[in-house]
Image: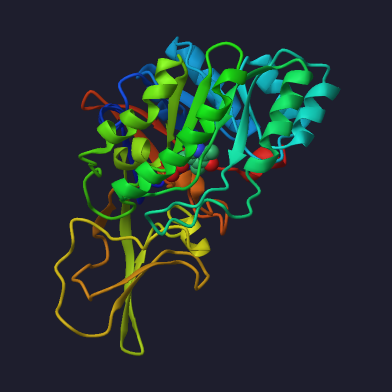
Amino acid sequence: MNTDDTSTYVYDLDELAASIDELRAHLPTQSALLYSIKANPHPYIVEHAARHGAGLEVSSEGELAIASAARVRANTDAEIVCTGPGKTTDYLESAVEKGAVISIESPTELTRLRELGSTGQNVLVRINATATSQRSGLQMTGTASPFGVDEQDADTVVRRVIDDGHNFRGVHLYMGSNILSEDDLVDQFEISTRIADHYVDYGSGTFIADLGGGFGHPFAAPGPRPRWQGLRRRVESLTERLSARRALVTFESGRYIAGSCGTLSATVLDVKQSKGQRFVVLSSGVNHLGGLSGLRRLPRTRVAPTPYEHGGGTPESLVGPLCTPVDVLNKQSPTNLEVGDTVTIPNVGAYGLSASLANFLSHPYPTEHIRFGGRLIATTRSQITYQEVVPT
Ligand SMILES: *Cc1c(COP(=O)(O)O)cnc(C)c1O
């Protein structure tokens, strides 16, 4: 395997643990936390999150395979919760086999479970809340959604779960991502708590009130983990009743947990001029980072430490190496970046490589380094090769 160290991700597991601790400090004392491995499915990250006491929220068969292997290696009995629309029979079958909790998103999934001849599963019903938030401009509730079942249909689906002989273990709500305002976070938990309160008496076993998350975090730009002064107290007062009825209040996070642990280093491959504009060509573009930004899901990248900026002038384009005009990481004030310089992009532990267009244009994958206890403990690199596909 040829190694290409012009682009390198570093994930720091101590930072991952610190983020989990910090998020816990914002949440009710008696609550559980799931790591949403969609944010970063690297096995070392998933395993470390499980070691550090997080359950695992997965949304595909592949993520389920990673989560269950990580749970074995971490030697924990971390809960695995399977979500995701359009669960296939294979996905459901492995969820059953691995003893995961299944968050049902539609009656079709219950039919598939029935066809598998499987009863007695631990099932949550994912609910798309009807209420709109009163205080804030949150657009994430009360709208049409492919996720979960609409609140007005939830009673019927819960009844069907019970009639099909499953253990109705609770409800699952998840209303949005990257929420930075404390009021907005509290608003959505107010809605999800009210729905969970309604169903708590129908459950069998410890009722799981999975209230969602959406805890915001900087992405691909410098900045500390957000802190919400009053969040714990305010959410605690919302979930008091659920906890008093022995429900396990549960939260989910990918971005906040994994965001700060990852840094991408890239090399300046070229600096060129075109019609008065400066282009800085990096070894990493949307194939390594920010593939979702083409879909307008992520803000623009800012390299750190901020290079010396020349005042004024036409903005400089920070681009990747792909032969497509989509591959623009940012337009910034002109800098003194030169060929051979290394730039670092902080806060890319979540929605970094695995959320990118890694196979597009077949550039080398970045290496991924894992640090723990101040030491490098592993280096990995994945890429589909010709030889793998066409045996010689
Ligand atoms: C994506 C997702 C998450 C994680 O979202 P973050 O913004 O990364 O915290 C949690 N739960 C569900 C159901 C999701 O789809």
User: Looking at the image, which residue is at 63% across and 14% down?
Assistant: 99
Q: Position of residue 63 (x, y in %)?
A: 57, 31
Q: Can residue 19 be seen in the rendering of this structure?
A: no
User: Looking at the image, which residue is at 53% across and 37% down?
Assistant: 173
Q: Position of residue 155 (x, y in %)?
A: 68, 32
Q: 228 or 321: nearer the eye?
A: 228
Horizontal arrangement in the rendering, residue 334 relative to residue 32 (left or right): left
Residue 18 position (above or below residue 119)? below
Q: Quadrant of residue 202?
A: top right
Horizontal arrangement in the rendering, residue 145 relative to residue 277 (left or right): right
Q: Position of residue 210 (x, y in %)?
A: 49, 29
Q: Quadrant of residue 3?
A: top left
Residue 75 position (above or below residue 196)? above
Q: 256 or 285: nearer the eye?
A: 256
Q: Position of residue 196 (x, y in %)?
A: 52, 30
Residue 270 position (above or below residue 357)? below
Q: 4 or 278: nearer the eye?
A: 278
Q: 387 or 192: nearer the eye?
A: 192
